[in-house]
Image (cartoon, grey):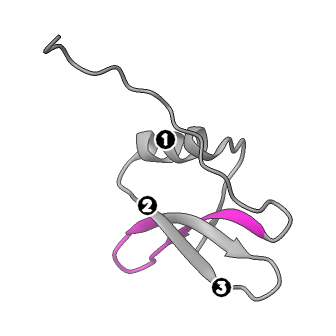
């Protein structure tokens, strides 16, 4: 009853025809942000802050992504 809730992976969606998954990395600070980049306009829509490899795996699992590219 008062136990810990089980973690469920919630699947979110994105438009695979218009956006591609990208991790933006700052050269100066090393900060990384996961999100989606529009193929036609180049606009970046950030989704979550990435602090370690586990956050990258969470991002992949949440959106059903196999591979993510990094941009500097």
First of labels 3, 1 by sequence position: 3
Location of residue 24 (image quadrant): bottom right
Q: Which residue is outermost to the left?
A: 2
**Residue pictured at 57% horizontal, 75% vertical:** 45
Image quadrant for the C terminus?
bottom right
Residue annotated with mark 1 = 58
**Residue pictured at 69% horizontal, 59% vertical:** 14
Task: Label 1: state its secondary structure.
Answer: helix
- Name the one closer to the observer, 66 or 12: 12
Location of residue 36 (image quadrant): bottom right
**Residue pictured at 38% horizontal, 48% vertical:** 52
Q: Which residues are magenta?
A: 19-33
First of labels 3, 2 by sequence position: 3
Give the Cα separation between the discs numbered 2 and 1: 10 Å
Residue 9 percent across, percent down from the top left: 50, 32
Image quadrant for the N terminus?
top left
Give the Cα separation between the discs numbered 3 and 1: 23 Å
Residue annotated with mark 2 = 48
Asked whether residue 29 is drawn in magenta, I would say yes
User: Would you say 59 lies left or right of 20 here?
Assistant: left
Residue 5 percent across, percent down from the top left: 28, 21
Query: Would you call the spot at circle 2 few (<14 residues within 10 Å), some (14-19), or many (20 or more)?
Result: some
Residue 32 percent across, percent down from the top left: 44, 65
Asked whether the beta carbons under mark 3 and mark 1 sit within 8 Å of each other, the answer is no
First of labels 2, 1 by sequence position: 2
- Name the one closer to the observer, 14 or 39: 14
Location of residue 28 (image quadrant): bottom left
Give the Cα separation between the discs numbered 3 and 2: 16 Å
- Name the one closer to the observer, 51 or 18: 18
Residue annotated with mark 3 = 43
């Amino acid at each position: 009853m008062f136990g810990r809730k089980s973690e469920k992976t919630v699947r979110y969606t994105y438009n695979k025809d218009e956006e591609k998954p990208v991790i933006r990395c700052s050269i100066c600070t090393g900060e990384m942000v996961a999100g989606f980049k529009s193929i036609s306009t180049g606009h970046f829509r950030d989704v979550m802050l990435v602090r370690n490899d586990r956050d990258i795996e969470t991002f992949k699992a949440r959106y059903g992504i196999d591979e993510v590219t990094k941009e500097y």
